[in-house]
Amino acid sequence: MAAALFSTYFAVMGAKCALPSVLSLVMASSSNGGLSFPTSSSGLTPNQLMARTITLSTLTIALGKAICGPIIDKMGGVLSLQVCLTGLLVLLGLIACSQSFALFSVCWILVDFFFSSCWASCVAAVHQSFPRHEWGQRIGLLAAAARTGNAAAFFVFANVLALAQGRMKQPWRLVFGTSAIMQILPLVLLRVYGKMATQSLNKTTEIVPMRNDAENNDNVSRTGNDKKKSRVKNDAPSTVTTKKQGKNPLARLRQEARTPSTVT
């Protein structure tokens, strides 16, 4: 499960590097392999349209964090990550096949919406799959996965562009296609190990209360035995004195003298 979460945040943060890696290629004219930008009636240039898209996608991240939090609490972290990765896979695939800037803009804004829920879903999955004393270690691995995912993505995308340059008219499509394919492995791992980790954690939490109940029962039985022993000890002296009185005739006469006789 740790490998599944590591690969998940690695792939998600890598996918976020796709647009910065190919922004200049996407902004080129359609004749030079870029997107087809609409002729705006307000006179907005392609740079201004792209800036507006990035602004809206950034605001979507903030909005998504506020909206997705309660949903993640209800769905659970593992299931939320599966939905998130599926959405990223579909949206990045659509961007890789799109030519229209309008479709690209809508898909990228939705990519950032799904991206906004990834960190909260990962933390919820850690709480859902690991015992409390391992939470800090697992969350630290997620942070490491984010930074290594960024670095690896820029390295891979640069090599992909270098190989495709001169062989394809629109090499930026390969970058978004690679980002989409990167989501498949963590999706499969979460599917396989998510339920296993949750079930094993539930078994562990069930065993602990059973042990506590057994210890409580032992303590109760020990307390009861101690009380019985103390009662026996308290009663023992009277029994001994009674036996001693029975053996000593003077003591028996004194006892009979103290006891009033019954008149018939």
Image (tube, helix red, strand yellow):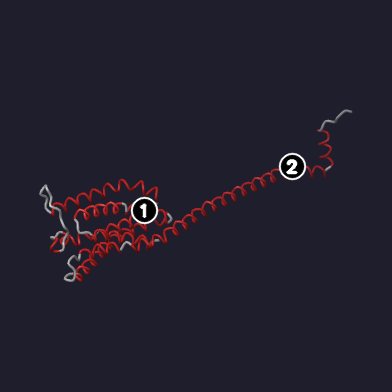
Q: Looking at this rendering, what residue extends furthest in the left direction? A: 43
Q: Dot 2: what SS?
A: helix
| Amino acid type of the residue tagged 1 in the rendering | Ser
In this picture, is 11 found above or below 248? below
Q: How many marks?
A: 2
- Mark 2 and mark 1 lie on one chain; the one further toward the N terminus is 1
Figure quadrant of residue 190 = bottom left
Please give left or right for residue 78 compared with residue 11 in the image: right
In this picture, is 165 found above or below 256? below
Q: Residues within 10 Å of mark 1 (few under 14, many from 20)?
A: many
Question: Of residues 51 and 118, which is closer to you in this image?
Answer: 51
Residue name at image x 71 percent, y 43 percent: 235
Disc 2 and disc 1: Cα gap in Å? Answer: 74 Å
| Amino acid type of the residue tagged 2 in the rendering | Ser
Residue name at image x 67 percent, y 46 percent: 228
Please give left or right for residue 228 compared with residue 148 in the image: right
Q: Quadrant of the N terminus?
A: bottom left
Q: Please provide percent x and percent y for residue 214.
A: 57, 52
In this picture, is 55 found above or below 152? above
| Circle 1 residue | 80
Q: Please provide percent x and percent y for residue 256.
A: 83, 35
Q: Please provide percent x and percent y for residue 210.
A: 54, 52
Q: Residues within 10 Å of mark 2 (few under 14, many from 20)?
A: few
| Circle 2 residue | 238
Question: Of residues 248 and 56, which is closer to you in this image?
Answer: 56
